[in-house]
Image: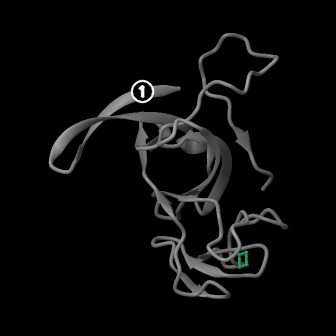
Amino acid sequence: MAMVCRGTANRRLEAAKLFVICAADSIERSNAKAFSLFRINEAGESRPFAIMVIRTHADNYIGYVNSCPHQGVWLNFGEGNFFTRDRAFLKCGRHGSVFEIDSGLCIDGPCKNRSLEPIALAVIDGEVCLCGVELEESGHPDPFDDGDDTMEIMIHPE
Ligand code: FES
């Protein structure tokens, strides 16, 4: 579902679309979910856009593109888990790079000192929303569509 919000950019007001991703309480604290979306690029083309939304223990929501800076795989590749065992850091499931949750900075592993790409999130009326990205809401018709205008999203296995 798309809404329109207004934010400041370059000292002027710009209209930006805000997309509802999921209910805020659908992600437990110290947990994360991945979503496979499609974004519209500057050429107007639809491209896969995999993201992860993390709910921290302190109840903040943080988003990154779900792509490891090393080889571009989903962080939850393999075991379907995003975190180190103590859940203090994000971890890539392929070669084990470890990332700070708050900053996305890799502190250990093959892509040390590189960072995950952040995405802008806002929690509005109990829903996690993505801001500043043009998402495709059509073009992938659901044969079971009941006319509800809620955006269809696919959740990666955890
Ligand atoms: S692909 Fe993530 S550490 Fe290699």
Instruction: Pick whichever, 45 or 5, lies toward us.
Output: 45
Q: Which residue is mark 1?
A: 3
Q: Quadrant of the C terminus?
A: bottom right
The kind of residue tagged 1 is Met
Asked where in the image residue 142 lies, by quadrant, the reply is top right
User: Seen from this angle, which residue lies furthest top?
Assistant: 147
What crowding class fits label 1: few (fewer than 14 Cα within 10 Å), some (14-19), or many (20 or more)? few
* Residue found 52% across the figure and 75% down from its top: 115
Q: Position of residue 112 (x, y in %)?
A: 58, 87
Asked where in the image residue 84 lies, by quadrant, the reply is bottom right
Q: Position of residue 125 (x, y in %)?
A: 42, 33
Side (left or right) of 91 relative to 19: right
Q: Secondary structure at mark 1?
A: strand
User: Seen from this angle, which residue lies furthest left?
Assistant: 11
User: Is residue 154 placed above or below 140 in the rendered structure?
Assistant: below
Side (left or right) of 6 relative to 96: left
Q: Position of residue 135 (x, y in %)?
A: 54, 36
Picture mark count: 1
* Residue found 43% across the figure and 35% down from its top: 18
Q: Quadrant of ligand 1?
A: bottom right
